[in-house]
Image: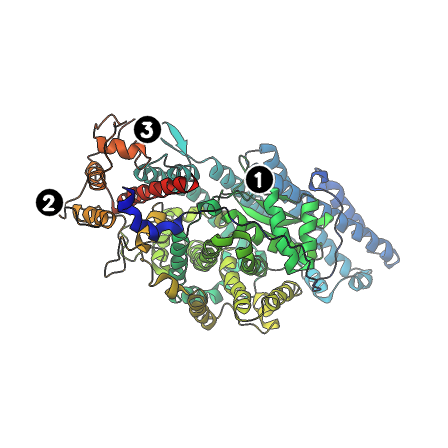
């Protein structure tokens, strides 16, 4: 068996990690930079930051008392002093709100934490409104001149034009938070029963990877889960849409996307502006580029790197060494985070599934939170979130201060991910190319997904009385337009848009990932085409720009191309293909129906890369088609270097028939079948070595037809078993 397969294994050995990922070289040299202005930060650990339930009644009373003082110019100094103290209380309330949010994220099933978060959100909204009203009234009072001296012209204009938040608007915001809390709890508790167990999407995926579920079982569970998820979460979304539309209308906006772009995210572009971006992303073939990269990553899959544990202090320490080499200022922010425990990256029950960075305002202390997924994405997320963390560390910790738009914040995070990849060879050694392909595939993919989901949300919020079926159909249409699925995909609806948490809790946010990823690539391209540390300095200079500059204005300030411009996107598409050497490395564009995220992707990509399976003239490998006897014979012929004789041609082949063909042609012998519905020794042989698995009821279903993808996975598992035997022999 080993001799028959050895020639094919030469093409597949890249799939196996023969040695652990390289440890970081010991280099603690700190590269001095000077782009940021020092800020105050509390010398407290996160565990010392105590949550306090604040009573807002006294704050409101104090606001009224200051308003009364302002009616006499003689009280001006006292009024300003007490106003500043009142702002301090608002900062403390904002900090309690953030602490409540973090603790709710750490356990969404903790009802007490959910109640405190709801209270803090409502209290913060009420107090903020009251203080803004006070600022307006103070500016118009006899004490107005001294207040103007303590405010910028921009802030003065803002407060003078501030309109009281109505009780109706506050009620809508409270309803929105209640729906978001319901969404978090529902999403965390969803599962589907199968074979006597309850399964989530994640537990089913890892069971498939471990060989505990067959491909058919996984497909059954995954389809049931996503449809249940769509129904449950879609119902909540349909409640959110009219509520948010009313919120926008009461705030004076024509649509909710207009409101969200302006009020929530302070963008210097509109939903209408970004529609040209949607079109350019489709025309630029970005999903095809992402697909090529994902295929390359699958071909070079290093299981030790991919499934590594990146949730411990050893990873935190490793990253710090390279941050120091990039910038002393980033090293300062990173050291503060480590020293005071201002992060949570551990696995725990009922974490909310998200990753984010926020700031505990009154402490000047950013906090990084992530729910780990158990694979390499946890490492890239750490770098991503530290990009946010570094920005928060250097901005003024106030309520109306220098916090930037979300789009700029995402440039900080994604730009750092790209620049940090410079160190992958030091960190991952021979696995660096896999790590790079994985990172680049995801960052190119988010350009597509950000645009796609933004277009879907614009549709949902601007379509009168939109239904869940309409959204599911629109999503299927957009997936075809962006290249996520084939145009002739038989599905009329697709459901997995509900798996994007931002759609529910930060509506219209997802476009930030797309436009910022497009912009972040400009720094990476500079690093490829010029001096690496010059690109790092440009990135730091960009991060240090003042907060009042918008997304487009910030790129203009550094005389860089506008990432929203269709011409820039066209050039970026060409540059990615060229700089990443996609044509040289892949030889040709990967199959259009192999995206890299499917359950069979590793097997299909490996066999395709080795020339075992080929594309048709339409560019497809058709993994979901039923396998025929001819398909099976062609596949086996690659293993034994001759064509087996089969008589049934284009007739469908069953699970039992393919197992018998495989075992007979490879001369693997027979073993006792562990399944109740077949005594075929060929099935027993493949079950013994972990190539096939049965169902929970002890059956195998040998008479069931098999898909092309299932057939590939069986062959791939046989090959991997041979590789393992070879490695054991080498070690011995």
How far apart are the alpha carbons under marks 1 and 2? 56 Å
Quadrant in which residue 396 is drawn: bottom right
How far apart are the alpha carbons under marks 1 and 3? 32 Å
Viewer-closest of 539 and 367: 539
Which label was assigned to residue 647?
Answer: 2
Which element is circle 1 on?
loop
Q: Position of residue 313 (x, y in %)?
A: 62, 43
Q: Earlier in the sequence, mark 1 or mark 3?
A: 1
At x 43%, y 37%, the residue is: 203
Which label was assigned to residue 696?
Answer: 3
Q: Mark 1, mark 2: which one is toward the viewer?
A: 2
Quadrant in which residue 647 is drawn: top left
Q: Is residue 380 above or below residue 32?
A: above
State left or right for residue 341 relative to residue 686.
Answer: right
At x 37%, y 65%, the residue is: 583
Instruction: Give the farthest residue toward the front.
Output: 732
Which element is circle 3 on?
loop
User: Where the C terminus falls, by quadrant?
Assistant: top left
Quadrant in which residue 1 is drawn: top left
Q: Position of residue 220 (x, y in %)?
A: 32, 38
How far apart are the alpha carbons under marks 2 and 3? 34 Å
Q: Earlier in the sequence, mark 1 or mark 2?
A: 1
Viewer-closest of 477 and 178: 477
Q: Earlier in the sequence, mark 2 or mark 3?
A: 2
Instruction: Give the farthest residue toward the left.
Output: 647
The residue carrying mark 1 is: 346
């Amino acid at each position: 068996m080993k001799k028959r397969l050895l020639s094919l294994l030469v093409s597949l050995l890249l799939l196996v990690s023969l040695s652990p990922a390289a440890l970081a070289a010991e280099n603690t040299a700190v590269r001095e930079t000077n782009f940021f202005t020092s800020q105050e930060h509390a010398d407290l650990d996160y565990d010392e930051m105590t949550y306090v339930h604040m009573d807002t009644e006294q704050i409101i009373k104090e606001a009224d008392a200051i308003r009364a003082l302002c009616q006499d110019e003689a009280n001006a100094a006292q009024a300003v002093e007490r106003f500043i103290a009142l702002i301090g209380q608002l900062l403390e309330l904002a900090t309690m709100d953030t602490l409540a949010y973090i603790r709710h994220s750490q356990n969404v099933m903790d009802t007490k934490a959910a109640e405190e978060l709801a209270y803090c959100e409502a209290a913060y909204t009420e107090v903020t409104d009251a203080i803004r009203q006070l600022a307006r009234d103070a500016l118009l009072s006899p004490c107005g001149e001294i207040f103007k001296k303590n405010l910028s012209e921009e802030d003065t204009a803002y407060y003078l034009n501030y309109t009281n938040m109505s009780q109706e608007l506050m009620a809508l915001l409270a309803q929105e938070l209640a729906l978001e809390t319901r969404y978090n709890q529902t999403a965390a508790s969803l599962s589907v029963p199968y074979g006597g167990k309850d399964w989530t999407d994640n537990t089913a995926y890892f069971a498939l990877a471990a060989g505990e579920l067959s491909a058919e079982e996984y497909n059954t569970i995954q389809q049931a889960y996503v449809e249940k998820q769509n129904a449950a979460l879609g119902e909540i979304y349909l409640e959110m849409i009219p509520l948010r539309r009313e919120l926008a209308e009461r705030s004076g906006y024509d649509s909710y996307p207009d409101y969200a772009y302006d009020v929530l995210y302070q963008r210097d572009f509109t939903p209408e502006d970004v529609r040209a971006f949607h079109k350019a992303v489709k025309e630029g073939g970005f999903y095809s580029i992402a697909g090529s990269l994902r295929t390359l990553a699958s071909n070079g899959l290093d299981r030790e790197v991919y499934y590594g544990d990146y949730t411990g202090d050893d990873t935190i320490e490793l990253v710090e060494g390279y941050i120091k080499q990039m910038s002393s200022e980033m090293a300062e922010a990173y050291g503060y985070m480590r020293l005071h425990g201002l992060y949570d990256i551990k696995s725990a029950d009922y974490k909310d599934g998200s990753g984010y960075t926020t700031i505990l305002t009154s402490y000047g202390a950013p906090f990084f939170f992530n729910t780990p997924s158990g694979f390499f994405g946890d490492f890239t997320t750490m770098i991503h979130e530290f990009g946010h963390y570094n920005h928060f560390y250097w901005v003024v910790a106030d309520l109306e201060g220098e916090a930037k738009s979300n789009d700029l914040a995402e440039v900080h995070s994604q730009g750092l991910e790209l620049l940090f990849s410079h160190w992958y060879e030091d960190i991952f050694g021979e696995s660096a190319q896999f790590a790079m392909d994985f990172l680049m595939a995801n960052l190119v993919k988010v350009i597509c997904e950000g645009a796609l989901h933004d277009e879907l949300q614009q549709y949902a919020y601007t379509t009168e009385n939109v239904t869940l079926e309409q959204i599911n159909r629109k999503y299927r249409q957009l997936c075809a337009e962006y290249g996520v699925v084939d145009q002739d995909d038989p599905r009329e609806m697709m459901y997995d848009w509900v798996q994007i948490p931002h759609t529910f809790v930060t509506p219209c946010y997802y476009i930030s990932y797309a436009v910022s990823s497009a912009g972040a690539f400009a720094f990476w391209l500079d690093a490829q085409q010029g001096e690496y540390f010059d690109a790092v300095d440009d990135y730091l200079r960009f991060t240090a720009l003042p907060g009042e500059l918008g997304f487009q204005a910030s790129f203009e300030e550094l005389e860089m191309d506008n990432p929203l411009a269709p011409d820039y996107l066209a050039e970026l598409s060409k540059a990615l293909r060229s700089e990443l050497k996609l044509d040289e490395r892949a030889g040709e564009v990967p199959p259009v129906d192999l995206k890299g995220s499917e359950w069979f992707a590793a097997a299909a990509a490996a066999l395709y890369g080795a020339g075992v399976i080929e594309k048709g003239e339409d560019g497809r490998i058709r993994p979901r088609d039923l396998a025929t006897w001819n398909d099976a014979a062609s596949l086996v012929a690659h293993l034994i270097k001759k064509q087996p004789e089969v008589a049934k041609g284009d007739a469908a082949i069953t699970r039992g028939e393919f197992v018998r063909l495989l075992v007979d042609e490879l001369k693997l012998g027979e073993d006792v079948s562990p399944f109740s519905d077949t005594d075929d020794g060929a099935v027993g042989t493949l079950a013994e070595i972990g190539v096939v698995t049965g169902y929970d009821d002890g059956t195998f279903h040998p008479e069931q037809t098999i898909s092309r993808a299932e057939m590939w996975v069986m062959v791939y598992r046989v090959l991997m078993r041979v590789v393992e035997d070879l490695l054991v022999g080498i070690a011995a």
